[in-house]
Amino acid sequence: MTVRTPPKITWLLLTFTLPTKRASQRVEVWRKLQRYGALPLGNSGYLLPSDPMNEERFQWLATSMRKYGGDASIVHVDRIDNISTPQLIGRFVEACAREYQDLIQQLREFSDMPRPKRPTGRLSRLRSRFQEIVEVDFFKSPLQKRVGELLEKADAASVMTDVTHARKINSRDYKDRLWVTRTRPGVDRCASAWLIRRFIDSKARFAFASQERVPREAVPFDMFHESGFGHRGDDCTFETLQKDFSIRDRRVEVISEIIHDADLADDKFGRKEGYGIDEVLKGWAQQRISDQDLLDRGMQLIEGLYHSPS
C-alpha cells in the first residue's frame, strides 16, 4: 500500500516597523492583519500560509507601510525551529474556532428572540461575518460546518416568516402574461424581470409604458399603479415578488438583499454588490440602447450574480 505524504506547508512572515507618530496607520495595519487571518509570531512579525492570495495581501500591506515611512519585509519560511508545523496549524485553527464560537453564540441569541423583535439586517450581517471567517479558515476548523448549518436553519426560518406576510395569489393566473414596467429600467426592474422570467412566468413578455397607458391585460411591475407589483412597506419590487410568489431559494434571498440595498440605498442588509450593477445600468441607460436591450442586459447581469459562488 502506498502511503501519501501530506503536501509540505510553507509560510510567509511579514516583519515591519512603523514610525511611532503613525498611530492611525498602526491601527489600520492591525485591522488588515486581523482581516487577513494573520497569526502573530511573538515579536517577530505576522505569519500566513504561503499562497498567491496571501502573498499579494502582504505585498500590498508592505507597500503601504513603506509609504508611511516605515519598513517591511516578507520572508518565505520553510520551518520554524521552536514551533512545529502541526502546532502552527493548531494555532490557526484555534483562532478561527474562537471566531466561530462567537458567531454560534450570536446566532443562538438571534434565534431565541421573538421574530418580530429580531433586528433588521442582523442575520445578513452574521452571514457576511461567517464568509469573512471562512475566507481565512485555511485549515478548515471543525466548527465551520456547524456554523453553516445554524445559518441555514436561521435562513429557512426567516424565509418562512416572510412568506406568511405575503399576499395570497394564484400563481397560475400569472403564466404566459405581458408584464409592463417603466422605460429605462434600473436595478430593481431588471432584477424583477429576471425573477419573473426564471421563477414565475417562463414565457413572460416584457413591454414599457407610461403610467396612463398600461394595457388592461398586462401585469404592471415597479410602477405607481393601483394593481400589479411594486414597492410595499420597506420592500422593493423584487422583494414583493419574491414574497408574494413564495420563492424559496437561498441564492434568490441573497440577491433580494443586494437589490434592496442598491435600490433603496438604506444599507439595511449591508450589501454593496448591487451598487456596481446599478452604476453599469445607469451608464448603459445614457447610451442609445433600447429599453428592451437594457432590460435584457440587466437580466443577464442578475443571472450571472445568481450563479456566482459567493
Image: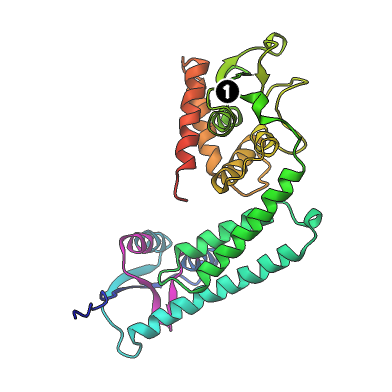
Q: Amino acid at mark 1?
A: Pro
In terms of secondary structure, where does tag 1 sit? loop
User: Height in image: 149 above or below 259?
Assistant: below
Closest to the observer, 171 or 273: 171
Queried whether the magenta region covers residue 41, the answer comes back as yes
User: Height in image: 258 above or below 67?
Assistant: above
Residue 81 point in image, percent of width and height: 30, 89
What residue is disc 1 on?
185
> How many marks on residues?
1
- The stretch in magenta equals 35-58
- The image quadrant where one finds the N terminus is bottom left
Q: How is the image coloured?
A: rainbow
* Image-based side of 254 in relation to 246, left or right: left
Instruction: Evaluate whether residue 152 shows in this view.
Output: yes
The image quadrant of residue 122 is bottom right
Residue 232 point in image, percent of width and height: 75, 33
* Image-based side of 1 in relation to 61, left or right: left
Closest to the observer, 164 or 144: 164
The image quadrant of residue 260 is top right
